[in-house]
Each structure stands twice: as C-alpha cells, then as structure tokens.
Image (cartoon, helix red, strand yellow):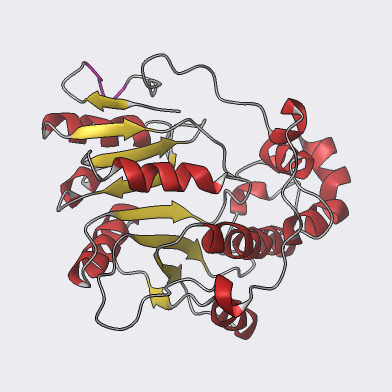
Amino acid sequence: MGRAVRTGARLPAADPLPLAPHAGPAPAPPALLGAPFRAPPRRARQADRVNPAGEGSPRDPAIALFAKAPRPGHVKTRLVPPLTHEDAARVARASLEDTARFIVPAVPAHWTLFLDGEPDRPLQSLAGEIGIPISPQRGTDLGGRLVAAFRDLRAKGARRVVAIGSDAPTLDPERILEAIESLSVCDVALGPTEDGGYYLIGTSGDHESIFEEIPWGSGSAAATTLERARARSLDVRLLTPWYDLDDAASLLRAYDATRPGWALREVLDEVRARLVTGS
C-alpha cells in the first residue's frame, strides 16, 4: 500500500506515474494470488444500507460514485470492437451494479451516485435498494464535474471527500477505507490505475484546484494531478495501483476475479469468446 509522501519531491507531469516509496509492482488479480474470492452479491438488508446517519448529523466522510447512464453508444465505447455497443452498455451496467452491491455497503460513509445521464427504472431501483441517492453530474469535463461534486458534498458537512468510478468492481473496499483514514492526516489520497488515470481521488479540504487543466483520458492524468498537488505543497497518500475496465484484457482479468452470482460475470460469460479473440 502507499504511504504519505511530501509532494515537494520531483514529479514532472510528463513522467510516468511513480509508485509510493518502497511500493512494489501492482498486485496480480486475486485468482493468480490464490486469495479467496468474495461471495456473490446478495440483496442488501436494511442493516446494510448506506448513509445510516439521521438528518442533521455530520456527513463525513462522503463518497461520490461516478458513473455514466449505461446506454448503448454512451459508455465503454473503447470496447467496440470486439464488443457491440449493446454489450458494452451491459458491461457498464453490470460493473455499476456489482460496485453498488459489493463495495458501497462495505464502506460506511455518505454515498452519492453522481450520474452522467438520466437514470432508467432498473438503475433507480438499484439505488433505492442499496440506499444511495442519485445526483446529476455538472460540468463540461471530468475535472469540472469532480469540482462540483466535491463542493456539493463539502457544503453538506463533509470534510473528507472521496470519488471513485464504477468501472473497478473488483477493487478491495479496504483501499477506500485506507484512503478515508489517510485523509485524517493528509490533504490528498490518490489511487492510480495502471494506465495512468486513477480509480480513486480524495481530499480533506478545499483542494479542488488540483483538478484544473488535467489531460483527462490520457496516460498522464494521475501524474498531472500529483503535479498540481506538489505545486500547492499538499501531502499526498498514494494507494496501490489497480485496474479499471477499459479493454478486452482488463475484462478477461476481471473474469478471473469473479464468480457466478456477479452481474459482471454473467455478461462476461456471454462475450468472453469475443474478448479472447480481440485481446
């Protein structure tokens, strides 16, 4: 896992994302490590519902779950081909569903689903079952949308605010808990993805300026964000890198990390042959 580092260390924005000191290579997926698989998702009981505090109580920590409405042609277009747009939308929906069923109830926090697009009835039903409110994303790019979400959550009383995506459903919830804990003593927590983006970003104060002028969708988004933090002399906690679902190889990796009962596994069972051919 990462450790707190002073961002005064040299970190050119154009360089590949560095790991935290003494961090080893990214871990292999659970199947390759021989680690036990998480049980298939179950319906959330009332006791499992998130956002348990009553009205008027402190809303810290707060977590923004970022997702796009899973419509064909709107999500996971990099998977086409080898998948169709319809299949890519099914992957996105299943990934969001498994994130909601596995990760959200495992991390006590005030969760909000920030959605790009209108939620359809199945998504509204899922959010109601889990107990997570839906809020529209606002902003012209990902940076602006992160800024708007973080300010919304801080305005409701959160000091530690974390954002994660819905496309890393095999992520261990302990990494989110680590980020929340680290934000008690650090300014920024960042979980980089192996392709140069990040699966998690969190701040413990009004530090949204680090999202300015980031080359979103490039291989240097995480490094540039860290450079912004360095320029502001912020303390950063780097988490262990993980992967998100962006190509055939990552979907095959997720296939090995899931079991029957996962929504994602059901979809991948149907499209796996095309993924193997196209990877």
Q: Quadrant of residue 72?
A: bottom right
Q: On the image, which quarter does residue 89 sit in?
A: bottom right
Quarter of the figure with the C terminus: top right
Q: Is residue 12 left or right of residue 167?
A: left
Position of residue 115 measured from the top left corner of the image (x, y, whole percent): 45, 70
Q: Nearer the viewer, residue 163 or 54?
A: 54
Side of 227 relative to 28 (left or right): left
Say if the magenta span includes residue 11.
yes
242 horizontally vs 153: left or right: right
Whether 57 is drawn above or below 246: the answer is: below
Query: Percent position (x, y) of residue 139?
Result: 29, 65
Determine if the magenta segment contains residue 4.
no
**Quadrant including the N terminus:** top left
Report the magenta residues as a range: 10-14
* Residue at left offset 60%, top offset 68%: 70
Q: Is residue 177 left or right of residue 268?
A: left
By secondary structure, the bulk of the magenta-drawn segment is best described as loop
Residue drawn 87% across the image and 55% down it: 270
The single residue placed furthest to the left in the displayed view is 232
Residue placed most toward the observer, 8 or 85: 8
Identify the image quadrant of residue 252.
Answer: top right
Out of 52 and 211, give the one closest to the viewer: 52
Residue 278: % across, % down: 78, 38
Q: How many marks?
A: 0
| Residue 257 picture location, percent across and down | 74, 41
In percent of the image, x 35 and y 53: which residue is there? 162
Give the farthest residue toward the front. 47
At a point 41% along the width and 14% down the height, the residue shown is: 22
Examine the rendered structure and indicate whether residue 102 appears above or below residue 34.
Answer: below
